[in-house]
Image (cartoon, grey):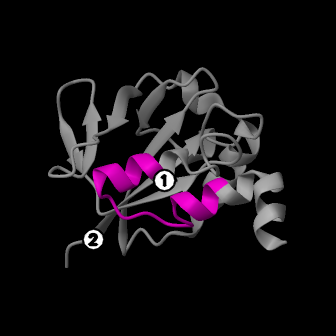
Amino acid sequence: MNKMRVAVVFGGVSSEHEISRLSASSVIRNLSAEKYDLLLIGITKKGEWYLFNGDPEKIPDGSWECDPSNRSCMISPDSSRRGVIVSDGSFVPVDVIFPVLHGKNGEDGTIQGLLELARIPYVGCGVLASSVCMDKAVTNLLLD
């Protein structure tokens, strides 16, 4: 049986960076290793994207950022590929992305837009719901 490859994206350029790391740690602990092949993608507060292959226990305290095995990466916007481009030139296909990003660039429709462009399925709300809910004035206007 082939396992589904799930990319868990955490951290981010947000005031909620630390909360994202805690949430991601919980998600990672609770995804079955028997069912899923996990790919961990951490985003630093500076906006650097890294493929993290180290110990997931390093995620909550932020020490994952100093792991020597980290490799720069990015989600490919090319919808024919659906995956992650790594700095060493390799490509890792993914089946679904679990964005565990809070606040700006995580819950505002930004990452959801990238994933829609790339045609990579993802967990959570879509672009419109995410962006509307982040803007409380727009949410209230729509509700009225």
**Label 1 CA crowd tier, 10 Å (few <14, some 14–19, many 20+):** many
Q: Secondary structure at mark 2?
A: loop
Q: How many marks?
A: 2
Q: Is residue 75 left or right of residue 130?
A: left
Instruction: Using the image as rendered, state which of residue 31 and residue 104 is in the foreground.
Output: 104
Residue 29 placement: quadrant: bottom right
Residue 3: assigned label:
2
Q: Is residue 118 above or below residue 121?
A: above
- Name which residue type carries label 2: Lys
**Label 2 CA crowd tier, 10 Å (few <14, some 14–19, many 20+):** few
Task: Inspect the magenta stretch and tell me whether residue 120 lies in it.
Answer: yes
Q: Residue at x 14, y 52 (%)?
A: 80
Is residue 27 visible to the viewer in this orientation of the structure? Answer: no
Work out which quarter of the rendered image holds the N terminus and state it.
Answer: bottom left
Residue 142 place in picture, x, y as percent:
75, 67
- Name which residue type carries label 1: Gln
Residue 21: assigned label:
none
Tell which residue pokes out farthest to the bottom in this image.
1
Q: Which comes before the other along the chain, label 1 or label 2?
A: 2
Q: Residue at x 29, y 58 (%)?
A: 119
Number of the front mark, 1 or 2? 1
* Mark 1 to mark 2 CA distance (whole Å): 24 Å
Task: Inspect the magenta stretch and tell me whether residue 104 lies in it.
Answer: no
Residue interval drawn in magenta: 113-131
Q: Residue at x 35, y 34 (%)?
A: 74
Q: Are marks 1 and 2 in contact (CB under 8 Å)?
A: no
Instruction: Using the image as rendered, state which of residue 57 and residue 109 is in the foreground.
Output: 109
Question: Which residue has dot 1 on it?
Answer: 112
Residue 114 place in picture, x, y as percent:
41, 46
